[in-house]
Image (cartoon, rainbow, N blue to C red):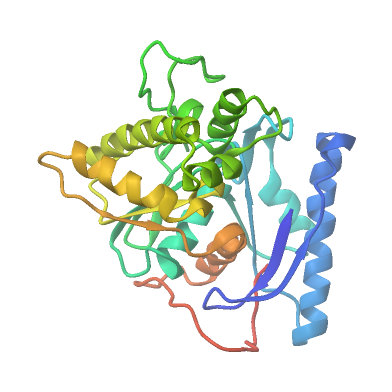
Amino acid sequence: MKAALAGPGGELLYQARLATGRDRGSEAVIEAILDFAAELRDEGAGRFGEPAVAAGVVVPGIVDEERGIAAYSANLDWRDVPLRALLSERLGGVPVALGHDVRAGGLAEGRIGAGRGADRFLFVPLGTGIAGAIGINGRVEAGAHGFAGEIGHIVVRPGGVPCPCGQRGCLERLASASAVSQAWAEACGDPEADAADCAKAVESGDPRAAAVWQDAVDALADGLVTALTLLDPRVLIIGGGLAEAGETLFTPLREAVGRRVTFQKLPDIVPAALGDTAGCLGAGLLAWDLLDAGATAPRAATTGPTTPPEVTI
């Protein structure tokens, strides 16, 4: 778990990390989150003379943001956890925002990161899986049922590799960091090899790595062109572990997407700017939004050290 005290411009004033303890069961994870938030509240009171005025928490899986319920998370073995109510009670009744981890990361990238200033953006992190966040005028669209942005389950290779979602040939089974790791491990014969090793091998001119990499880039381009045809984003932000390959990914990806567009407008394709702090920043922004519901424009990031009179968790 990553946590932070956040100032009103999205700046992280204090950060901390803690293991989820999921090996102890789903209830233990919930208690760990509540305890961690309470510790952070006390840290804020000690540093700034008063406790945090709101809190934001973002989790993986299916999230009912309107009701404040973590509806389902396979990794945490959660079903219908009333996390917003539990956290608000533990923090003495402060307002709490509950969000989805990827959408929150997209919110931060859109407002104060790589998409800052863009009225429409799509954030796609390439990690263990592939998800997405659809940004519109400083907000992220959750969809009618909380599923908006699930680009990883666009079928790009019909009849292809089975996906746990029940389909075959899903994008994340071909172009996620874990998919590239698996393909490269099989190609090079080293079960410990991963996507970062594949990228290095591409850079060194290994034809086996180049073939694995190009297969992933082609699948990713097919999925992204489907998404941009539907959404028409101004900026396409690529993050996650695979994006750490830099131009080894972005140069062929821009070329592949460019070859596929016809009538569509090609968006700027850029790397994410916030790294693994995006989720914390997004959670903080969600918390500030609770206190700033009347704002008509996204907040801007501040620069330099600050000591604001109010902070959020």
Where in the figure is residue 223, as x and y percent of width and height? Answer: 34, 33
Q: Is residue 134 visible?
A: no
From the viewer's side, name the closer residue of 259 and 23.
259
Q: Quadrant of residue 179?
A: top right
Residue beneath the point at 27% across and 51% down: 233
- Residue furthest top as drawn: 159
Q: Relative to residue 31, is residue 219 drawn left or right? A: left
Q: Relative to residue 185, is residue 118 drawn left or right? A: left
Q: Quadrant of residue 73?
A: top right
From the viewer's side, name the closer residue of 244 and 39.
244
Q: Quadrant of residue 76?
A: top right
Residue beneath the point at 17% across and 40% down: 261
Q: Is residue 151 visible?
A: yes
Where in the figure is residue 237, as x and y percent of width and height? Answer: 39, 54
* Image quadrant containing the C terminus: bottom right
Residue beneath the point at 59% across and 57% down: 279
- Residue furthest right as drawn: 24
Q: Is residue 31 above or below residue 190?
A: below
Residue beneath the point at 77% across and 65% down: 16
Where in the figure is residue 291, as x and y percent of width and height? Answer: 54, 71
